[in-house]
Every structure is written in C-alpha cells, then in structure tokens.
Image (cartoon, coloured by chain):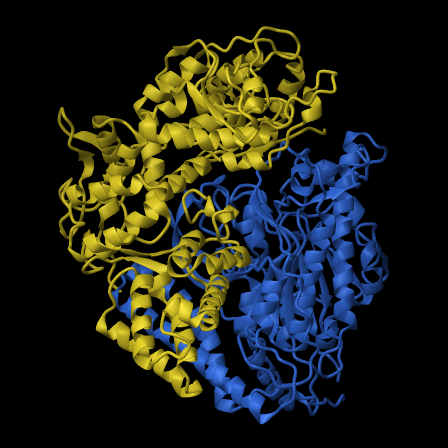
Amino acid sequence: MKSYRFARRSFLAGVGGAFGLTTMLDNLVAQAEGAGSPARFMLSHFPIGTYRQSFLPTGSQTDFTLSPILAPFQSLMSDMIVLYGLTDSHLRCPGGGGHEAGTPFTTTCASAQGTRANGGEGDDGTAGGPSFDQIFLKNVPGLKVGAGFMNTLADARVDSLETSTQCLSYDYQTRSIKAANPANTNIVEHQPLLPELSPSKAFATLFTGFMPGGNTPANNEAALKALRSRKSVLDYSLRELERVRTLAPGSEVAKIDAHAAAVRDVEMQLQDLIAKGGVSTMDCPVPVAPDASLKGQTGSKFNYGNESTSTSDEDAHEKIGKAHAAVLLAAFQCDIIRVATFQWSPGTNHVSFKGLYPATPNGSFMHHPMSHRVGDQGFFNGPPLTGNDANASLYKFLVAVNTWYNQKMADVLTTFKNAKDALGNSILDYTVIPYVTEVGDPSHARSPKASMIFGGKGLGLKGGQFMNFQGNQRKQVDVYLTCAQALLQNADPLSVLPKDEKFDRSGASPINGLWAPPTT
Amino acid sequence: MKYRANSRATALGSGVAIAGMVFVQAACTASVDANGMGNPGTGGTSGSMGGSSAMGSTGSIPGGNGPIACDGSTVTDSKRLVRLSFHQLSNTIHSLFDATFGHKIDADFEIGPEAAIARTFPPLASPREQGIINKPIWTTNDQIAAAAGAYTLANLNAVTACGAAPTDECAQGFVKTFAEKAFRRPLTEAEVTSLLTVYTEVKTQYTTVPEAIQHSVYAIMQSPQVLYRTEFGADAKVAGPLTPYELASELSYFLTDAPPDPALLEAAKANQLSTPAQIAPHVDRILATPTARKNLEGAMFSYFKLDNLASVKIDDEGFTNGTAAKPYTGIRESSYREAELFFEKTLWSTPLEGLLTSKKTSVNTTLAAFYGITLASPPADENTFVEVDLPANRAGLLTQAGFLASNSRPDVPSVVARGLVINAALLCATNPPFPTDQATLDKIAAAKTQLADASERAHYEYRTSTPPCLGCHLNFDAYGLALDTYDAIGRYRTMDPQGRPIDPSVKLPSTAGGGLAKDTVEMESQIAATPGFASCVAKNMLNWALVEGSQLTPASCAAQKVAQGFSAGDKTFSTMLREIAVSEAFTNRNAGAAQ
C-alpha cells in the first residue's frame, strides 16, 4: 500500500480546478488506507478504420507479434488489448453517411432516428443515445469530479458541415431538430457535446485560477471572495433561466434545461467548495499553459476531388494533439476531471500528410479524400500491395497514415504511463482508454472494425492480449462493457447500468478474459 | 478491382458529385422538394398579424385569379427561443464595448466577421454552432462574459463614465442602462432586482464598487436575455405576433446580424412595429446601410458557397499548355473579389434575375485579360477593379471564374457537379445521393472504361439515355453540359482538350422550364425567368431569416407568399427581403406547446 502526501497549494479558484482538487482530497482521504487510485476514462479515436492484413497481429491471444500498423505500440504491449472483428452493422440511422453515422454509432452503440438538416450533404448522422463517456460519467461512482469532463479534438475540418464526425461525446439531453433524413420530419437527437479545438482554451477551462503559492490566510480569503462572487453570477444566471423557463413554451424547456445544467454543474461545485471554507489542495504538476496559437483547424472542405495540398499539416497536427493530451494528463493528475474524450481528427479527415504517397514522394495529400480514391472493401482488406504504382502507393499512403496516428498515440500513452498521480501510481494504470474508429475501413464497412483498449491495469484489465472476432463478430458495445468491468469493478456491468440506457443490449456482454478483479 | 468510386462535393442540398465522370443513383426521384410540411395550423387569416389561436393560411394563399395551392401554412414556426450565433454575439459585444475589446474577443474566440463561423447558411448551420447552449458552448460564453467583466474593471471610467471611484448611485445606474442595451429592451422590475442582487452580493464580498460593477457586467453578458432572442409574443402558449421588441431584434439580426439600432428600439417602444406598413420603412432604411448590405452580401456569398474558392485546389500546372505561363496566377484572389463586388453592385441595383443575367462585372487587369476584355483605361494596380461589360459568351454569376473554379475538379470541369449545384442552389431540387450498391458501382466503372475517350456530350447522352442513370441525370446534367464551354478555371473554350468542338446547346429539365438553350447565357436567362428560381431564393432567404431553418420548400405557403409579393413588385432582392420581413412567417408564430 502506498502512502500519499499532502503537499498543499493554494490557488484562486475559478472554474474546474479548485473544486476538482478538493474532491480529490476527500476521495483520497477515503482511499488512503488501502484502495488504489481513482478510476478514469478517456475515450479516444482514430479516423477511417484500418487495413486488415497490415493490421492483424500474428500469433496467439497472449503470444503475438504486432503488425506494421500496430508496431508503434510495441513498448505498450502489456498495457494493450487488441480487438478486431467488431461490428456496428446492426445499428440504424436513416440516411446516415459512412463516417457520419459511424462516429455516433461507435461511441453511443445506439441506433438513431436520422440525419440533421444542416445545409450540407444530408448524411450527418445524429446520436440515438448518450455516448459511453457520458454513460460512465453518470453511472460509475466517483467518476464525476470537478469540471466533470473535457472533450478535445486536434482538427475539425470536415466534408460538408457535418457535426457527427467531429464529435465523440453525446449528452443525455435530447432535442428535436429538423431532419434531412427522413425528409420533412423532426427527429430527436442526443445533443452533441462538441470538443474543444484549442489546447490553451481547454487549459483555461480546467486550470483557470490555479495560483501556486502558500496556503496563506490572505490567499484563502482572496480565493473565497472570488468563489462567492462567481457563484453570485451563476446564481443570477440560473434565476434568469428559470424566469425564461416560466414564460417559454414546452418545446423550449429542454433547451433551457440544457443551459441550466451547464451552469448548475459549476455552480454546485462552487457552493461545495465555499461550504468547505477553503481551497487547499494536493500537490500536482500544473502544466504551463499551451501556446495559444495551437488550435485545430476548422472548415467544410468537401473536396473529394482535391486530394493534394500545397503544404502539409502533420507537424501542427501532432503538436495540437499532444498539447491536448498534455492538458488532459495534467487534469487527470490534478484530479480536475476523470472523464475525457480525445480525438485526433474527424473520420472525414482533411489533415494532409507529406511524403507518405510513394508515387509522388514530395507531395502532400489529405487523408479522407485519398481514402475515397478506391471504394472496394477488398482493396483495403486484401494483401498489402507492393510497388509504387498508383494503387500500391495509395495503399501504402493509407497504411502509413494509420501507422502515423498509432505512433503519435503511442507517444501520448507513454507519457500517461510514465506520469504518476498523487499516490504515485501510473496514470495509465488507472485510466481506461478505448481507442476506437468509426468504420471498418475506407469503404465505410460497419464491420469488421478494430478497437484497442489501453491502460486500466490497476483496475484489473489484462493487457497483452489480442482477439480476432472476424468470423464471429462482437458488437462494439462489448468493448465498452469490458471497460465498464474495470470502471465499476463488477464482472457483470449490465446488472449495474440502468436498463433504460439506450445502447443496444441485445446479445451484448463484456469480452471474457480481459478483466479480473485486481489483487491488492 | 480498383476504381475511383465517388468523388463528391456539395452545393446547397445533398449528394453533389465531382469526378472525371460521375453518375448518381439510379431510379432516383430527384425533383423539386415540394413536399414541405409546414406547421399545419388550423386557420388564421393570410396577411393578418393578429393573435389568433393558430396562425396563417393553410394549403393556399390568395392569388389574382383565386387561391393558389401551396404546402402547409404561411406561419411556419411555433413560439420559441433562438440562440444568437457567435457572430451575432460578436456584433452585440461590439455594440456594447469599444472596438479594442470587440476585436480582442473576435480574435481570442474566433467569432468575428473574418471567422469561418460568421458565414454559414443559415446562421446556425456551422458545426461549431447549435441551437442550444450546452456545456461546451456555455463554457465559451462564460469565458467571454468573464472577459467582459474584467475589461470593464480594467477600463472602469471609459466603460461606465462613473469615474475611477464610482458611487453606488452611478454604478447601479450604469448597470441598469447597460443591461437594457444588452437585453435590447427595457428591464422588468424583477429583472432589475435580480441584477442588483449580484451587485449587492459582490459588493458585500469586496466592499468596493468596481468589483460589483465587474461582476454585474459579467452576469449580464452571460444572461439568457443576451444569449437568446425570445419569440414568445404576449403569451408563448397562444399563437400570435412577436412583441415589438422581439420583432425589432429579429429584424435587426436578420438584416444586419447585429442588435437593433435606436430607431428600431424607439419604434418598438412606441408600438410602431405591428403592421407591414410600419415594418417596411425600417427594412428599407436598414437595407440602405452598409452594415446590412455587407451582411446580406455575405449571406449570398455563403449561399453559393463561394468561400470554397479560398481553399479549392487548382492544378495550375495542368493549364500551362507546355509553356511557363501559369494562367491561374492571381485569378483566385481576383475572382473572389469579383464575386464580392458583383453581389455588392447587382443585389441592390438590378432585379434579382441579374444574378444570372447581368452583363456587368468588375475586373482588375488580371481578370480582364482572363476574360478577354480590353480595358480602355487599365487601373493602376491589381487591387483596383473597374466595372465592365461582359463579352457575349458570359453573363451573371454562373460564368464567373470564381463560381466555375469552385465547382470543378482541380484539372477538369465536371458536368455532373456543375449540374447538381445549379439544380440545388438555383432551383432547390433535392439532389440524389451517390449510389453505394456494388452493382451500380460496377456499371459506372464499366461505363467509364467504355467511354474513356468520349466527349462530355457523349457521356451526357449515355447518362441521360441509359437506365438506371437516366432516372437522375436527366434532371440536372443539362445545366452542366451548357457550362462545358468553360474549363475548370473558368476560361471560355470552344474545343475540348482533344480538339473536338463543344456543343453547349441543351434541352433544359422541366424544373427550369424545359426549353431549348443554345448556350449558358441563354440557359441563365431561362432559369432566371422560371418561377422556381424566385421561389427557391425566397425559400432559402426565408430559412436564413428564420435562423434555424424550418422544413420549407419552394412550394411552402410561406415561401410562396414571399415569392408572390416579390413577383408583384419590382423583383429586386430588396423587395424579397422586405416581403420576408413583413410576412406572417417572420412576424408571427404558432402557439407553443404547454409545459
């Protein structure tokens, strides 16, 4: 059993940081006599599926060799579960596009009513239920602390105004919207919780008010004044929302409630902190604020025919993604949040990469437009192509991009592995990180899909395993139910998760052999 | 088999395709989206603005020769709460603070006029926007509001005019005045009390007035009264008109994307915004302002998705013809500016059909050479544009280099893509999705091989005569074929790259009148004369005005009513906007549901 230490710091409380840290203090006091670190969950994503024969490891379930695409994870093998042959084929979203319906399918595991009328292509899939980050936030005891959660995205350029591909996280709150499909109808969607594109803004949201300094009376008094004044503002906001609510028609109540919920979340935590009479906290490595110029790009590109770019994006893309990851890591270490989503790019990915297309070695090409140069599933899942002709170059480009993302994700995960929380445990060991994708491959196949689960060793996840369900497909939801075993410390999470949760339960179950109660 | 399956792009509508040769799905039912289901309502009187229990005419509108059949009701939306877009919030901040702070917020949060988010059609269509304020959007709003409070504290006298050491009396007076301006209407007594509670509570904490002012401003800027517009009318549960102050805000954000000016607020205060006759002069007054014109020109710019021009890939090397010259050099920027100037001049000085038929445009020396226009007095530099008459082979927006390049592949034009854009953007037809079944994809691949060296007309004839392709392509390919006399960067040509003469004559689809057109200029004239064109623009601009977009179609009674007023008038863009602003769809709402 590790002991823990209280190296106190004081800070002026703003949003997030202060109350998260105080909560951590309480929780750690409770856990100190024998429990491990608190559980955390980070839903992560890579775009546009994978390429079967360059992806699949060789060997047995527990004794396997990583494929070229997975090779970047070599040093993380014991923290990694590789899964293939997952499916979302049973889910429905009328009119939903491959990536557009696939993204909410992959994170909610629920069918949806249709697509948004947003002026774009009409295939922007909605969410038929909350995503699993929100499901866990609600249902896993202790997972909700401080600011609750943070969603991040390193690049938001999409095809045609779609929201779906740039959002992993969906709320319990629903709303009625105009649908593109079914045409001329209104449908109900679970509201997208759009990610933050700017690491510096994510940092500001999570760490505003952190002020390293002594736990002096003056600091505490200043912090309390700030807390109380801010609470006064939020109380006002809630009063005025209630005033609007009494005047509004029934159709707008959900809109007002969503707004009020966002305010109340922070307001209640302020109240809690004020009631405790102080803002002391544990030591944690508050990071330097990220460069404000780092920010994911936005835009609606819809240029399938325009694959090349004059400049490439991969360097900036890596920096932005890693800056987001650093903020999330620090927020985990400081226990400001225990739930996050981390997305590199939309499935309709317009990040361009230089030097990965052998037929034009100095050219820069965008991921998603290139992925639709060929539409044949056999092309993506067949044997790796050799040579430098157009088809072989295309295959190599797509595999190289897939590998690029894995390399950068491995870098991120390695920092998580090496970082310690306040108990001295590896952040990765107590963080469950599913790494999922919205399609099986660029043909938009809903199966077979790949997923990985990283971390969670301290919570009982058994890394170092590979399972291929290609001939006997498992639903994507089974990945989350396996994560749920670790988060809930329960072999049968379906008995804990409420029956009215909207994810598809039919035939769903955790994957055997990937989790066991941890031994202390 | 390896093949290029589906290169796609979009215009307004769905499923636009761009490829060397592209087909869309068989057995489609591409047609004008005439099945709009406006809120049915149960009665009401067309043209009235009273508060009956259900609003608008249903299923028909009065016409000169008796009722005109249409879909739904002339009142489309129910009582509701409308979130300000981020750009509208930016303009609101600019109206409340000085330019320094306004520009800082624009830059820090990317919500200003230069942000991509500012030009989406309709206003909340951007993925970064939503009709609701959930946690991520609230976080941004909260940060902006906190920044406003901090700026006020740091610039206390400049913002409040209460001096460096303000008294309670002056401070509270400022807070009330500031809130009234921010709310765009007078405050109720209860609202004043609620706001001063913040002031008092914070002053109790700090014992000083400046912090109380700071947090009061912070509170105001994140209040629902600032972040939304209400469309409740006198009673949200009863159908009827918006209140005068609600209408003032709706009208101002529609026309200028900014809060109402003093004249509108005065009119609201005097209850002088209740009839079309009272509203119309304000429309005309506001439309004469540069702010409104710039906003609406921007709306049309995004309507035609010309923003794409900034990023569209042009294979300049492919147009060199073996020479060192790069014919596209300077054209991208020049044609972008040309389109801006075209809207600036055409929208306000000619009938709406001028968008398609105008023989005027503005060019710099680069663009003049590109179009083959000799300038009598060449402008001094590339930033100077002069208005010129177009040559016989060009007219209106569709033959501009910017529109043509932004709807082409990098190296070749696309008959299908151009056709789909016109089908959706000018006639509001629903474009079919690209086929996804393997059998059709295989047929496309086989046809591509079979027609590898054929002319675009041969491709067109194949697609419009061969099942299953003809089911869809008959509805839009003709538009793109007429435009084939312009290459991918918009240069006029009479021969294709293989040296074959290009015949741009086409028989137009029935949605465009079904007539024969010998070339693009004739085609544009015929489309402009089609009632469907005016109905389509009316429908889209009404959607813009209603922000979140109802299920309107050109056949919707609400759109038809606007189109009817437009046609009875001088048929200018201004008239269309005025018809929208005085329409029941704009001024009235159906009853909201009980809670």
* Residue shown at the point (50%, 86%) measured from the top left: A224
Residue A257: % across, % down = 38, 67
On screen, residue B190 above or below A248: below
Residue A321: % across, % down = 68, 58
Q: Is residue B12 left or right of residue B58?
A: right
Q: Tell which chain the image draws in yellow.
A: B
User: Of residues B122 and B147, which is closer to you in this image?
Assistant: B147
On screen, residue B429 above or below B235: above
Quarter the C terminus of chain A occupies: bottom right
Residue A28: % across, % down = 65, 87
Q: How many numbered tags mark residues here? A: 0
User: Of residues B554 and B148, which is closer to you in this image?
Assistant: B148
Q: Tell which chain the image draws in blue.
A: A
Quarter of the image holding residue B7? top right
User: Of residues B62 and B251, which is closer to you in this image?
Assistant: B251
| Residue A90 visible in the shown view | no
